[in-house]
Image: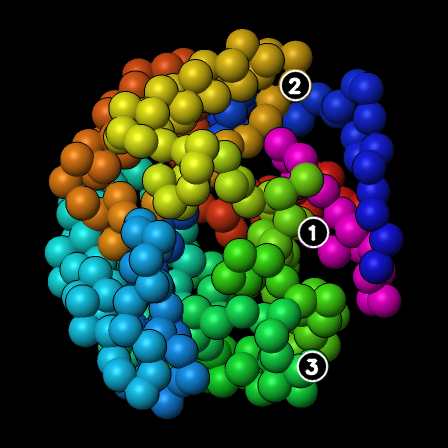
């Protein structure tokens, strides 16, 4: 696997988006609740709360307090974010671990009702780089089977927890049926990477416009920090838009941005974005299909 530090270079290409949009925005609702590491599922550790430095209870004990933090995402957080997206009329992408959907099939039902697309996020919310290649292959296949059974569709894109293993992309190609992955964050617009099967599309993810920054330092100490980052980012992309055309990924997690104060940041950003000329919201699969059709390798 080689690195490309040049990309589109000094003069990025001018991108023509649907309806002449200057910026296409993709909102990714990340849903992992119930698929995290837990001795309840036979794991050798419990996932952390994420917002406190101190570790919770460890095996052989369950971390009952942290479990309720994840439970909040499934019971309340995901539905608060769903209401905000529904009220705004914004198409979104749901990056869901397969087991999380299996444990709360109403989320999959909402996705079908509203036409939101699915981004594969693992069978469970586990770290691919900790698995052998055979283990990762088996979990990929188990994830697809679960998505088909619970959601009625398989994902056309993939996004690993945190980052992929060295085998992930080749396993996606081996399995077949994937249009793209979002395991890279190397550009502002989609790009192709070399693989054993030829060029493969990456629709870049963002760790900047991502509510996981509530958990890191320096990061977001207030929802206003997230809102300001999103708003400044969109406005700057719009300023560049007439000459370039670009995209923006906004990632929110059910248990983090599903909290009322943080949900307000997403709602206010959507209000702002919908008032701007040249902004269009697209699902991730729509971005991938447009790029493959308009800008083939």
Along the line of sight, the residue nearer the viewer: 246 or 217: 217
What SS does tag 2 mark? loop
On the rendered structure, is 68 left or right of 162?
A: left
Give the label on residue 201, or none.
Answer: 1
Q: Quadrant of residue 63?
A: bottom left
Q: Earlier in the sequence, mark 2 or mark 1?
A: 1
- Cα gap from disc 2 to disc 1, whole angstroms: 19 Å
Q: CA distance from mark 3 to mark 1?
A: 22 Å
Give the residue drawn at x 59%, y 27%: 246
Graded by Cα atoms within 10 Å as few (under 14), some (14 to 19) or many (20 or more), the crowding at tag 3 reads some
Label at residue 7: none
Q: CA–CA distance between discs 2 and 3?
A: 39 Å
Between circles 3 and 1, the one closer to the viewer is 3
- In the image, the segment drawn in magenta is 187-201
Q: Indicate which label's residue lies in the foreground, 2 or 3.
A: 3
Of the pair 257 and 159, the residue shown nearer to us: 257
- Circle 3: element type: helix
- Residue 105 sits above or below residue 211 on the image: below
Residue, disc 2: 244
Label of residue 133 in the image: 3
- Residue 202 position within the rendered picture, expressed as x and y whole percent measured from the top left: 66, 49
Q: How is the image coloured?
A: rainbow
Task: Answer whether residue 102 is visible to the viewer in this image.
Answer: yes
Q: Secondary structure at mark 1?
A: strand
Labels 2 and 3 touching (C-beta < 8 A)? no
Tell me, yes or no, if residue 173 can be seen here: no
Q: Point out the tag, 2 or 3, that comes first from the N-terminus.
A: 3
| Image position of 150 with respect to 234: above or below | below
On the image, the x and y values in percent for residue 42 come to 37, 89
For marks 3 and 1 on the same chain, the one whose residue lies earlier in the sequence: 3
The quadrant in which the N terminus is found is bottom right
Measuring from the top left, give residue 157's x and y in whole percent.
55, 60
């Amino acid at each position: 696997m080689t690195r490309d530090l040049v990309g589109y270079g000094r003069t990025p290409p001018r991108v023509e988006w649907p309806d002449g949009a200057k910026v296409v925005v993709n909102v990714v609702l990340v849903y992992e609740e119930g698929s995290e590491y837990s001795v309840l599922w036979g794991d050798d550790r419990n996932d952390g709360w994420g917002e406190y430095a101190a570790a919770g209870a460890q095996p052989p004990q369950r971390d009952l307090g942290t479990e309720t933090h994840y439970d909040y995402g499934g019971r309340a957080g995901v539905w608060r974010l769903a209401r905000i997206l529904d009220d705004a009329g914004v198409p979104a992408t749901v990056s869901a671990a397969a087991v999380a959907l299996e444990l709360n099939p109403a989320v999959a039902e909402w996705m079908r009702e509203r036409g939101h697309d699915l981004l594969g996020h693992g069978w469970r919310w586990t770290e691919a780089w900790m698995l052998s290649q055979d283990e990762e292959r088996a979990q990929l296949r188990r994830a697809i089977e679960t998505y088909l059974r619970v959601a009625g569709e398989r994902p056309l894109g993939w996004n690993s927890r945190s980052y992929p293993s060295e085998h992930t992309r080749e396993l996606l190609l081996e399995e077949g049926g994937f249009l793209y992955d979002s395991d890279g964050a190397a550009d502002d617009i989609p790009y192709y990477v070399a693989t054993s099967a030829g060029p493969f599309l990456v629709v870049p993810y963002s760790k900047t416009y991502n509510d996981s920054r509530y958990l890191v330092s320096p990061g977001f100490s207030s929802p206003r920090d997230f809102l300001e980052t999103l708003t400044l980012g969109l406005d700057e992309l719009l300023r560049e838009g007439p000459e370039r055309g670009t995209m923006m990924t906004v990632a929110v997690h059910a248990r983090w941005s599903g909290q009322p104060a943080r949900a307000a940041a997403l709602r206010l950003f959507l209000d702002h974005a919908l008032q701007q000329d040249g902004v269009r919201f697209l699902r991730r699969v729509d971005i991938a299909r447009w790029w493959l059709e308009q800008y083939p390798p």
